[in-house]
Amino acid sequence: MAHGNLYDVYGPELIAVDRAAPDHSYHPRWTDLARILGSPMPYWPMALRKPEEMVRWKPGDPVQLIDATHELDTTPLLRLAADSEDNTPEAMAALHLARTVHEGATSDALGDIEILDTRTTARQSGLLPPPSGPASRQRACPRT
C-alpha cells in the first residue's frame, strides 16, 4: 500500500506487510511489484482511493478515468437543488457548494498526480502513466 508523502525516483513510498507475519513490514519498489505481476502497478492518489475501484483492478487493465472522492456527502445539497425551483437562491447556493466540494477533490487529485509525475519517470517507476488529453485535465484520474 502506498503510504506517506515520501517519493523517490521509483514513486511514492510503499509499505508491504506479509499476511504470514503481519507485525513485519518492508519497503518494496514499484518496479518489484510490476515485475511480480507482469504489469505496471496503479497508484491511486488519496482523492481517488475508492475501494471498489481498487479491488476491481487487475494486471493489464487499461487506465480509466474516475471521479475524485471527497469527504463531504453532497447528496443533501444536490437534493435541495433538485427539489427547489430552477434559479432560486437556495438552488443556486446548494449547487455552488456541491460543485465547490467536487472541484476541490478533483484539484487535490490532479495535484497529487502532478507531484508524482514530476518526481518519477513512469518507465523507471513501474507505475502506469495517467491518461492524457482534455478529459484528464478536467477530471482526476488514477494511475490504473
Image: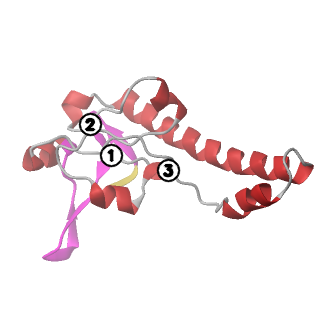
Residue kind at label 1, given as amino acid type: Tyr
Residue drawn 39% across the image and 25% down it: 132
Residue located at (38% from left, 45% from top): 6
Task: Identify which amino acid the numbered label 2 is placed on.
Answer: Leu
Depth check, front residue: 118 or 93: 93
Assign a secondary structure to mark 2. loop
| Location of mark 1 (residue) | 43
In what element is the residue under mark 1?
A: loop
Q: Are marks 1 and 2 in contact (CB under 8 Å)?
A: yes
- What colour scheme does the image use? secondary structure
Count of number-bearing discs? 3
Q: Which residue is mark 2?
A: 128
Q: Is residue 22 above or below residue 125?
A: below
Image quarter of the C terminus? top left
In this rendering, would 78 be left or right of 63? right
Residue 105, x across and y down, in percent: 58, 47
Q: Main secondary structure of the magenta part?
A: strand
Q: Which residues are magenta?
A: 5-30
Residues at marks 3 and 2, CA–CA distance in whole angstroms: 17 Å
* Tag 3 residue: 47
